[in-house]
Amino acid sequence: MIDLVVVGAGPAGLGAAIAAAEHGLQVCVVDEFVKPGGRLLGQLHEEPDGKWVNGIEEAQKLYSRAIELGVNILCGVSVYDLQKVDHGWCVYTTDEMIESKCLLLATGASETPIPIPGWTLPGVMSIGAAQVMGNVHRVKPGEKAIIIGVNVLSVAIARELQLCGVHVESILLPQPGILAGDAAQPEKMMESLLRLSHLAPSPLIRMGGKWVSPKLGARLFPKNGFKMWGIPIQLRKTALEIYGENQVEGVRIAEVSASGDVLPGTEKTVSADFVCIAGGLTPMSELASVAGCSFCYVPELGGHVPLHNEFMQTNLAGLYVAGNITGVESAKVARAQGKVAGLSVARVLKALTYGGNEKLHSAVEEVKETRKNALIQFQPGIEEARRELYGKFDETHKKTLISI
Amino acid sequence: MNEESTVVCRCEEITLKEIQGTIEKFNCSSREVKLRTRAGMGSCGGRTCRSTIDRLVEQMGGPVISNEVPLSYRPPVRPVSFGILGGAKE
């Protein structure tokens, strides 16, 4: 029986593996993708100070450090079941069964699809798939893209597609109706975009972020949209249908009012050879659910998250969570959470040396600090939602766990 | 193509119309929609359409999404061969 199995080799999983291995623990990391790094692999962006962040390099650094510390990393291996056993966990993978004293789920988030008429045509993909094709596999998904879904993620990836040499024709809203829900509401999406305002080169939105209310923003929003990096962002246009004979040929669009109603007589078609659907991210909780964790529904964090405390413990002994499974946030926050989880495991397995408690507590502070300085807030109210979640955990479970 | 004929569950090819019709007729939960229509029971294990089904049920007057995960997850949570289930290495 080894000390720790980590599911997910993203920033959280590798961060945890490193922290645990630095304290002498025997660690195995399992990831279903063929390369380690998780969502880091897709990231490429310019920070406000002009420095470029290349996620592939960040992933390589974490990977090298983990290998140096003797962490066993299995890629292209999926976990399909879990079981609590005496003094630990049994993890069933497509490679072998592994037993460990502690188990960390760092499985990240998955994309929320928005079904749109014509979305089963070849050439329609999720925005994350386009990112993986371009940035990880170095395959250009097409020449001319239309992105359906205006949010922080879609705007960031549109920029990456542009860097791949793709012409992004426009980013617009999905068709209003029961399938799209809020994603078709100009006001709601304006609210989401305003959180990107500090990154936007456009003075309109940069200013807007400071003082424009989402309601006013949506109403004043120019009919033809505004541009970020030359990409038209169109909060007052909607995708009615993706059309094409055997594959994507274009999108039928129309104008919408500020409240999201289609304006009659404004329909037209726009050609494209691929379409990306961006419905946002939601924590990937399947393994935590199979394990039997308690859950909390927290919209600010992206949906259902396993109940946990700020030391990344769940309500089940020996089971930990870190990264986007605990709520959708940036890769930097995920990495900081991973470190907390790794130290937390080391503490429980009595591997923390002198001064270990201080280390753990300062790692918890680091998460808060990183969150405060995060460039992108995926949702408003993350801080408050987390405080409430941890409070709930303490109320119900503190007594049953080994106290920290 | 209109919204009604849009495929929601891609694995089992279940349309919005069929799901909406089922919710209306039986006033049912996500789980019942799954059992009645097979939406969410295909090879992806509901990973693609589960959130849409939950949202449809909620918007059509079903129970408000609570702390419970509406459609429970059961192992295997990834498609695996009988060989692997039987303990063989891939």
Image (cartoon, coloured by chain):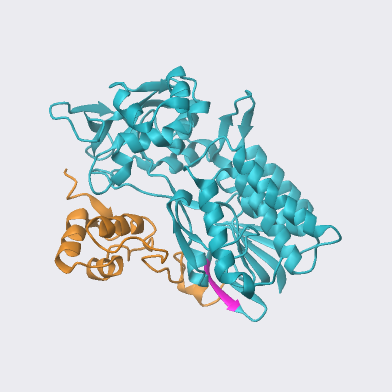
Above or below A72: residue A350 = below
Return the x and y of residue B58 as percentages of the image width and height: 28, 58
Return the x and y of residue A164 as percentages of the image width and height: 49, 28
Does residue A109 appear in this view? Answer: yes
Q: Residue at x 17, y 55 (%)?
A: B17
Q: Residue furthest bottom?
A: A86
Q: Is residue A91 left or right of residue B79?
A: right
Q: Is residue A114 left or right of residue A399?
A: left
Q: Colour of chain A?
A: cyan
Q: Residue at x 59, y 65 (%)?
A: A394
Above or below A218: residue B78 = below
Of residues B53 and A357, the one nearer the viewer is: A357
Q: Number of labelled discs?
A: 0
Magenta-colored span: A80-84
Indicate the chain coloured orange by its letter: B
Q: Give the quadrant of residue A168.
A: top left
Return the x and y of residue A52 as percentages of the image width and height: 62, 28
